[in-house]
Amino acid sequence: MIPPLRIVRGKYLVSFKFNSFTLGITMNYRDGSALTSSQQVFMYLKMANRTRMKSYLLFLVVFFRITAFAQIPKSAEIYPKMENYYRQHFPRVDYIERVFKPVLQYDTIHSKLALVTLSDKSYLMLMLDTDFLIKNALLFSEDHYFIPQGTLSKIKLSKKDLDGTIYTYVERFPSQYFDKLENNFGKIQDLRIENDQYIAFPKKSFLVRPISGALTSVLKIDTLHFRINSLIQTANYKGDLQFNEYKYPQLPDSIEQYILTQAMMLAEASKEYPVTTFKEMYKSAAPVENFEGKSFDFKQLISFNQGPILDKTAGKYIIFDFFYQSCLPCHKMTGYILDWLPGVDSSRIVLVGIDPNDSEWSMKMFVKDKKINYPVIIGDQAREIIRYYHVHSYPTLMLVSPDGIIQTIHEGMSKSFLTKAEKLLNR
């Protein structure tokens, strides 16, 4: 009897039950060349009836990834196997997706980071946006240089300057610690297998220690290659959960090459950049244009959650609220606006959020969780607006009159912005 063919996480899966064990065979899904039935899988398996089991299994190894539900290895065997994998597959682009829900802040923080090895003694750590474009970079060599986005200069930093910044996360990249696994994690106290992963509970926490509270650390490891899938730490602090996870997904070759190309171009160009300081960089920056009294030049605005917003904004004042999800002051200011709106003539004013940083998937969850009922612009249009109007601080608030003229722009939290808006509404 031919067993059914299932698709699990983008792969074909067929399971065979023998007297003493179960053999699971998975095949990568390829558009245009995908198998469509169990019968086609069995075209490759007919020789099983004519040869010994040894030849049969050898044939499967050639054509399939074989997952046998075997005995879990000993804890002491895990670290050497992981180290062996990374020695044989040292990543040219080491990639992390960080998910962090701090106890004392409002929102979950999502970050994309990459580490590109330039030589034995230098590498480039990158902060990436949702489209895998470089936002900022830090060059690690004999000296450390911060390379801000949109500048043609670099800022020399000491190790002390990096304390408490995202750039200390360089130690979270497997390429930096694969040969020090037991030293970093301590002995594995418990080891399980679940969904093609070894779930290891190490003795020590490799991630940032929370303020206090019971701590749980988990290391997830691929059962086939012994590659790290993720590091997870959770802690309870006065009843609130702090969650910290570093995911290590394998990027498609095209995206990995895209990141690598950007990094190599930046590394080469930065050799000619003059060394400066933050103070000098800000001093030499061109003065920001004053847009108050000028026309708001974006007419065809499209929100991701309510579509085109022209009908909602026509003939009304518009408050544009520039924010991003992990910005605590942004959410406080938005709260002030939402509390203020019912006290004014809401038929004459509308709130529109603009978030240039977060992905659509993340924003869908955010809008649902926060029950947001006003339009929010994200993606390319949001980024185009912030570049055009030189928005660098968050929150930034902009009030546009019904005739399309920018009345006022304010950076940071301020109820005085609402007072000014109310005076205009009451004219």
Image (cartoon, grey):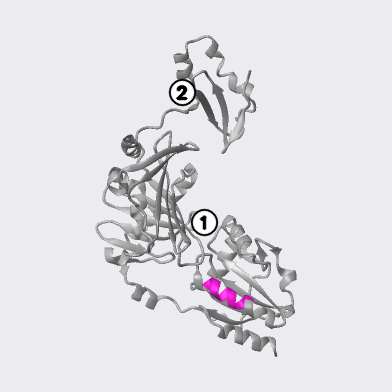
Q: Is residue 148 above or below residue 89?
A: below
Q: Please tell me the numbered disc located at residue 61.
A: 2
Instruction: Report which quarter residue 74 is drawn in.
Output: top left
Res. 119 visible in picture: no
Res. 387 visible in picture: yes
Q: Label 1, label 2: how many angstroms apart (C-alpha)? A: 37 Å
Residue 209 inside the magenta-drawn segment: no
Task: Look at label 2 and name its amino acid.
Answer: Val
- Whether residue 391 sits left or right of residue 94 in the image: it is right
Q: Residue furthest left?
A: 142
Q: Is residue 39 above or below residue 120?
A: above
**Residue in the picture at 55% in, 22% down:** 16
Q: Is residue 247 above or below residue 70?
A: below
| Percent x, y of residue 82 | 35, 38
Q: Please tell me the numbered disc located at residue 243.
A: none
Q: Quadrant of the N terminus?
A: top right
**Residue in the picture at 64% in, 66% down:** 372
Which numbered mark, 1 or 2, is in the foreground of this view?
2
**Residue in the picture at 45% in, 64% down:** 238
Tell me the magenta residue range.
Answer: 330-338
| Percent x, y of residue 162 | 32, 64
| Percent x, y of residue 88 | 34, 36
| Percent x, y of residue 271 | 32, 59
How many circles with numbers are drawn on the protein? 2
Q: Is residue 261 above or below residue 90?
A: below
Whichever of labels 1 and 2 marks the residue nearer the N terminus, that label is 2
Of residues 298 and 14, the one drawn nearer to the viewer in this rendering: 14
Return the residue at label 1: 130
Look at the numbered disc 2 and give the secondary structure of its residue.
Answer: helix
Prevalent SS, magenta region: helix
